[in-house]
Every structure is written in C-alpha cells, then in structure tokens.
Image (cartoon, coloured by chain):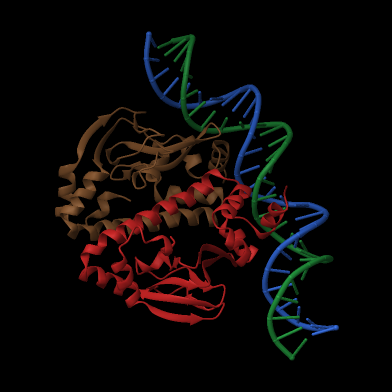
Chain colours: A brown, B red, C green, D blue
Amino acid sequence: MNFNQLDNLVPLDLISKIFELMEQHSFPKNHLLHEKGTVCKHIYLIHKGLARTFFYKHGKDITVHLASEGEVITAVDSIISLKKSRYNVELLEDSEVLSISYKTLQDLLSQYPEYEKYVRLVLERMYTEGADRIEEFLFYSAKERYENLIRTRPQLIQRVNLGHIASYLGMTQETLSRIRKMP
Amino acid sequence: MNFNQLDNLVPLDLISKIFELMEQHSFPKNHLLHEKGTVCKHIYLIHKGLARTFFYKHGKDITVHLASEGEVITAVDSIISLKKSRYNVELLEDSEVLSISYKTLQDLLSQYPEYEKYVRLVLERMYTEGADRIEEFLFYSAKERYENLIRTRPQLIQRVNLGHIASYLGMTQETLSRIRKMP
DNA sequence: TGAACTTTTTGATAAATGTCAAAACGTAAG
DNA sequence: CTTACGTTTTGACATTTATCAAAAAGTTCA
C-alpha cells in the first residue's frame, strides 16, 4: 500500500492529523525497527529508504514484505493480535522513518470516528493486495513471479539484495540467478 | 473469516442489523453465485453448504478460496474496485446462502457510522489471515501445506473434491494424491 | 591498494513437483 | 444391476526447483 497514492482515498485533513501524531526518526542501514519475540506496537511509514520484514526458517531468513518510500511496514502478525511477533523488521538502507503507535492511531479514531471509514478503505485495499500476492503463488512459476515483480516494482531489483528478492518471491537465490539470465 | 466467531469482535445489535438486511436463498450444487467477467456486487454468507472461488489458467480451473458454514465469500477482485471479476463463485453442495449487496452494507455504515470500527476489526483480521496464507507458500512444501490444512480445516477434506483441494494448495491433483499416501 | 567480507554466479547433482495416459474406483441414473 | 460419468490413483517420464560446494564478482574499509 503506497501512502503517496492515498490522496484520492483519504481526506487531507486526516492525513495531516496522522502526520502530526507521527514521530520522525533517522536510522542506519541494518537497524531493526522491530525485533522478533516482542509485541509490535508501531506502524512505520518509510519516508526515505527501504525496509523489509523477514523471519527465519531452518536457519535461513525469508523476506515476507518489502517497503520503500511512501509505503508502510510493521509486524502484521503482532500489531493487531498483540501476540509476540515471529518477524523482524529491518532497514536495508540508511532511512528516514515516521512512526505512530497503533494505540495512538486507535485513540485518534475514537476521537474522530468519522475517519473510521477511510481506514476501512485502506484496509480493503491492503486486503486485495494480499489476495493478489496469494494468486501469484497459485498461478505463476518462479520465472513469471520474477517478471511480475520487475513489471510492478522495478526499483526494488536495483536496491535490494537478490537473496532477499529471491526469498520474497518464494525461491532460492540460485534459482533467481539462473532465471535472470534466461532468454 | 468465520462469522460464528464474530460475537466477541462485533456487537450483537450490528450483527442483527446486518442480518435484517440480508436476503436468504437456496441454490443447488454447481449454481454460480457470481460469474466471471461481471462486476460482483454482493457478499455471501454461507449458512448451510459450501462454496469456492475459482478461475481458469490455461484451461485448468484453480480454486482460490473455500468457504463453509459461517464463512463469507465474494469476488474480492471486483467488489471493492468495481472492476469486472476474473473469478467465478460456485456452490459445491446444495446450499442456503445469505446475501447482502456491498452498497447496502455501505449505506448501513453511513447511517450508523459507529459501526465502522467493527468492520475495520473484521478487515484487520481478514488481512492477517491473508498474510498467513502467503506465509504458507513462502515457507512450506506441498506436503506441509496439506498437513496444515488438515490441522486447521479438517472438514474440508471430507467435503471438497481432492482436485479442488489440490489447486487451492497450489499443487496438482496427482501430487496431492501421492502426498496423501506418503507415510 | 589490498585484505576481508558479502553478494552473485556457476556447476554437478538431488529432490520435488508437473505432465500425460491409463486404470481403478465410486456413485448416480436409467 | 449395469452403464455412464466423474473422481482418484498409478506409472513412466519430463521439468522445475533445491541443495551443496566452489568460483567469481563486487564492496568496504583500514
């Protein structure tokens, strides 16, 4: 979900209210915005830079989500349920990040319930984006998934390790490397 | 998302208001609740029976979603965007179904905006369920995906064709058949 | 610059999954 | 009961993807 495209979905006064409540941070590459095993309380908006959500399976790390400028990232398995998260959220570049706690956002919505509708619209869109990603795995081969990523988010390929791209696409780094040199 | 477990998330008066607005239908097995190529306007709650969302890839049909009693089904690629859907929604058994148009639901929320919050809670939960399904494909082998399904929704295996189960899990029917007889 | 480290590629091989065709099985309808 | 039809299994084989090890290429920093 890219928050730069939010203008036509959400009124500007809500956007500015949220921005007022956000804190600005600068963090170096490799900084962990969130660490696994803890409850995640914040949602992060990437202003400048790049972040990923990942976790470990049999010692290997697998990238679940990638967020660049204008996009939002958090530990989805924790922020709503308040359970301890399996995920780490890590910066892949020196970054400027805006953060808001989920609690603060909920308080804002309690105070101005007229905004609930817009949060719903954003969530609806996020849900359909998730459904599209599921479709990717049901329908497309490793090569097709890579081609789809190039088409939809070409900048990522330049900025993210191919190892991370590979696990994000559900394949090994070696497979991705071979796919990339196929005709 | 199972609406029978909704009681602790959503107040009863909202549930009953929605039920008042829903229409009840009985349809036979194989009836299409929604046909691909058209805009999907309704959300369906399965009261008795079973339904699936599917579409065609290279002539083969692929099941994207399965819904049994208490669960909701619709063409997610259409209902929010109002684009023509790629999906069919089909009944797998003679079924009793409650339907509400998305428009009616929106009108209800406009009239009682205090309910928006609960729709948000439901959407948040649906979103995390989607995230879990993506994780399935990133982390688990065909065999593990099948075992997870047995664990989480054992009734489905009894009631749904193995061919549909297989495509829902992202594998061929033959692979599923072999997995089932592995030790 | 060059040593140390990380990332990417390559090769050989193995394992998982897909394809196609046919047989076996199950079930509904005459 | 028996035919017809849809579903599931089986077998032989092909293709895709993973694994492991090593080399090559790229990056960082003293």
Q: Nearer the viewer, residue A146 or B88?
A: B88
Quarter containing the N terminus of chain B? bottom left
Q: Does any portion of residue B160 appear in the rendered image?
A: no
Q: Residue at x 18, y 60 (%)?
A: A114
Specify the quadrant of the image occupied by residue A88: top left
Task: Say if B18 sits above or below A51 in the image.
Answer: below
Relative placement, left or right, of A115 versus A49 is left
Task: Say if A150 sits above or below A53 in the image.
Answer: below
Q: Position of residue C23 (x, y in %)?
A: 84, 66
Q: Residue at x 16, y 55 (%)?
A: A112
Relative placement, left or right, of A141 versus A155 is right
Q: Position of residue B41 (x, y in %)?
A: 37, 74
Q: Position of residue B46 (x, y in %)?
A: 47, 71
Task: Say if A43 sits above or below A109 in the image.
Answer: above
Q: Residue at x 54, y 43 (%)?
A: B139
Relative placement, left or right, of B140 versus B104 is right
Q: Does any portion of residue A17 appear in the rendered image?
A: yes
Q: How many numbered tags mark residues here? A: 0
Q: Nearer the viewer, residue A2 or A102?
A: A102
Q: Position of residue A150 (x, y in %)?
A: 44, 47
Specify the quadrant of the image occupied by residue B166: bottom right
Q: Residue at x 55, y 48 (%)?
A: A142
